[in-house]
Image (cartoon, helix red, strand yellow):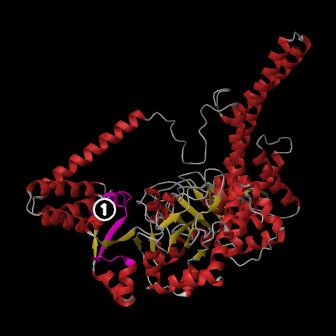
């Protein structure tokens, strides 16, 4: 367990913008910040961070809360794991004991994170402190020109050649064989025999964005027959290779600083570039680039430069799947390395300074690069030339920005020596075809419509109890935003609601809790606000408070001052709106009582209790009378509102 004092210390040091900024590129918007949602695939920002209230709200996915909630949602952490992560980030010491490791064993994700961290530490120790690790693993890294600081930055390691060394070490520390297998650290053969997956290899830990180790890549150094050069962790609960980019944890700040990202193929390519003082680099780790990986990069930059090895066949294969980068709206550039070279070999061959200069001098946009490649392949063959033109137009068609499409069409027309109108005709055919496909897919898709983005639920179709809770929600929303606003000279909003709720109780537990905390604080002579609940509330309460205090859209003050377009200010209208809300709540409350009483009448009739029926009918008449009076005050027809 983590002590309350430790948790409070962590919370006191948290900077919301700093925490979320580790995962998302935030842009200032007035006093707040906004970004593309890290939880959904969207094209326009709907993710907002409000430092003054210590909360974020993602209108795209509906998620919201404080910094701890964000880390939990984004990384899939438990509360304890989120606290541990933030404690490490802000240098707050958390004392760990063996018992605390075992206490996390009930949660598979937490257990896997702990186990993978232990494996990382073990492999690093073997690399630097074991004779075999030093003579084989460390020598290999140093021969490739990797300095000790860079080796430690990427937490590189070594696994001994023994069949079950790591397995035995982990078992001795209390980890189970079941968890070792789930983590992909050991392999079970037919017959039940188990052995280390990464034996006799140098180790490349794979980190998530928070720095947790989620998997490993391992390279063999000898020339053993029937052994692959690289072995990677299998898919696990915490590791999905299509959603991870190697080196992004180490590169994210440099990507923001430089404004773009280099994309390479393998682990050593990344490390070689970092060794050459190029830190804004990530790798797809030998797998085909996926949409998830592209979206991961897009959180930090819209500009990607891909480094292609100087191998014609490899280039042709690589560019087939690269169009999806353009489709996601990113700006794509290419650097082609000399024939027979890759980023690792060429950076070591020419040195850091010359390599960095080469990258600057040989960068070109992807469409120009693709056109040049296709033209050279087509040569003077008219059929292949026509195919090259169609393939180029298909790539241009996936670009979402029509201005960029137009620029590339003009460029393609010049390079292919063909009329622009012909290319536009082909482009329109592709675009129309894609639109037809989307319509057909939409016609086949009979999924439920998405809920509204805004936090307020629609009124239509709600039960009487839900209608009551909707009105309770509105009252608590006003309270969170305007508790100390004066309704009259000596009466503020909180005092008014406290007086009105002397004979009423909330039906929604969450809203009732928030209201009671306001009332208790007033009795102590204190005034609390939304920030109080973000510090002291449960995750459920934080979610409620976030939903109730953030709006997606605000009327610009310039509309009133500059353009004389006027909107009613909610705070100014509270003297009228607050009593109206109380009337509506009482009206909904009475309607709910009418429904409940009718149910009691039917039950009494069913059991033949005529005396109870008579009493309940009298209650029903009083409720109907109250219903009509409240409806009259609201200016509506009873039962129609």
Image quarter of the C terminus: top right
How dense is the environment of label 1, judged by Cα within 10 Å: few (below 14), some, or many (20 and up)? few
Q: Is residue 407 above or below residue 252?
A: above
Q: Which residues are magenta?
A: 316-343
Q: Is residue 535 left or right of residue 521?
A: left
Residue 116 to residue 280: above or below = above
Is residue 321 among what the camera can see? yes
Q: Secondary structure at mark 1?
A: helix
Q: Is residue 513 left or right of residue 410?
A: right
Q: Nearer the viewer, residue 409 or 138?
A: 138
Q: Residue at x 51, y 73 (%)?
A: 252
Q: Nearer the viewer, residue 544 or 192?
A: 192
Q: Which quarter of the picture shows residue 612?
A: top right
The quadrant of the rendering that contains the N terminus is bottom right
390 on left or right of 104: left
Q: Is residue 12 above or below residue 147?
A: above
Q: Residue furthest right?
A: 611
Q: Nearer the viewer, residue 384 or 198?
A: 198
Dot 1 corresponds to which residue? 319
The residue shown at (50%, 38%) is 449
Residue displayed at 59% across by 82% down? 152
């Amino acid at each position: 367990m983590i002590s309350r004092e430790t948790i409070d210390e962590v919370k006191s040091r948290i900077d919301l913008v700093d925490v979320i900024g580790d995962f998302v590129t935030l842009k200032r918007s007035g006093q707040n910040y906004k970004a593309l949602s890290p939880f959904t695939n969207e094209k326009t920002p709907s993710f907002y961070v409000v430092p003054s209230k210590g909360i974020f709200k993602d209108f795209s996915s509906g998620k919201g809360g404080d910094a701890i909630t964000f880390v939990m949602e984004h990384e899939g952490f438990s509360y304890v794991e989120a606290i541990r992560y933030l404690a490490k980030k802000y240098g707050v010491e958390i004392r760990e004991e063996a018992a605390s490791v075992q206490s996390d064993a009930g949660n598979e994700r937490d257990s896997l994170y702990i186990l993978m961290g232990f494996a990382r530490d073990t492999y690093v120790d073997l690399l630097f402190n074991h004779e075999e690790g030093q003579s084989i693993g460390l020598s290999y890294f140093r021969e490739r020109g990797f300095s000790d600081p860079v080796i430690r930055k990427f937490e590189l390691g070594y696994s001994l050649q023994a069949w079950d060394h790591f397995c035995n070490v982990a078992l001795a520390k209390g980890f189970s064989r079941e968890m070792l297998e789930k983590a992909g650290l050991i392999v079970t053969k037919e017959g039940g025999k188990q052995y280390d997956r990464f034996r006799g290899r140098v180790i490349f830990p794979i980190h998530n964005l928070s720095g947790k180790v989620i998997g490993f890549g391992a390279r063999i150094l000898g020339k053993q027959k029937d052994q692959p050069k690289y072995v990677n962790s299998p898919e696990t609960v915490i590791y999905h290779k299509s959603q991870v980019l190697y080196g992004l944890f180490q590169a994210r700040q440099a990507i923001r600083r430089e404004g773009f990202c280099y994309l390479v193929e393998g682990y050593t390519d990344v490390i070689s570039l970092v060794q050459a003082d190029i830190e804004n680099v990530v790798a797809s780790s030998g797998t085909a680039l996926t949409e998830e990986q592209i979206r991961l990069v897009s959180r930090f930059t819209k500009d990607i430069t891909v480094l292609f090895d100087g191998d014609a066949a490899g280039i042709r294969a690589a560019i087939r799947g690269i169009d999806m980068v353009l489709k996601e709206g990113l700006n794509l550039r290419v650097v082609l390395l000399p024939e027979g070279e890759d980023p690792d070999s060429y950076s070591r061959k020419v040195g850091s300074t010359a390599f960095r200069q080469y990258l600057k001098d040989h960068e070109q946009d992807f469409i120009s690069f693709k056109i040049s490649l296709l033209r050279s392949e087509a040569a003077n063959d008219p059929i292949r030339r026509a195919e090259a033109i169609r393939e180029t137009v298909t790539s241009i068609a996936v670009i979402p920005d029509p201005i960029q499409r137009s620029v590339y069409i003009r460029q393609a027309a010049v390079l292919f020596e063909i009329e622009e109108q012909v290319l536009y005709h082909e482009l329109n055919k592709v675009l129309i075809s894609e639109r037809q496909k989307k319509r057909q897919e939409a016609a086949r898709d009979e999924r439920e419509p998405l809920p509204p983005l805004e936090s307020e639920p629609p009124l239509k179709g709600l039960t009487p109890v839900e209608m009551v809770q909707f009105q309770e929600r509105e009252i608590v929303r006003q309270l969170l935003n305007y508790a100390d606003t004066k309704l009259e000279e000596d009466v503020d909003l909180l005092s008014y609601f406290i007086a009105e709720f002397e004979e009423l109780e909330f039906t929604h537990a969450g809203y009732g809790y928030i209201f009671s905390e306001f009332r208790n604080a007033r009795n102590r002579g204190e005034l609390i606000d939304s920030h109080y609940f973000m510090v002291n509330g449960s995750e459920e309460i934080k979610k409620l408070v976030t939903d109730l205090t953030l709006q997606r859209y605000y009327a610009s003050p310039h509309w009133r001052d500059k353009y004389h377009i006027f909107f009613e200010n909610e705070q100014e209208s509270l003297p009228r709106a607050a009593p109206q809300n109380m009337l509506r709540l009482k009206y909904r409350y009475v309607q709910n009582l009418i429904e409940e009483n009718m149910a009691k009448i039917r039950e009494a009739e069913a059991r033949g209790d005529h005396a109870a029926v008579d009493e309940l009918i009298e209650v029903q008449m009083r409720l109907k009378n109250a219903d009509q009076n409240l409806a009259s005050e609201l200016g509506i027809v009873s039962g129609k509102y």
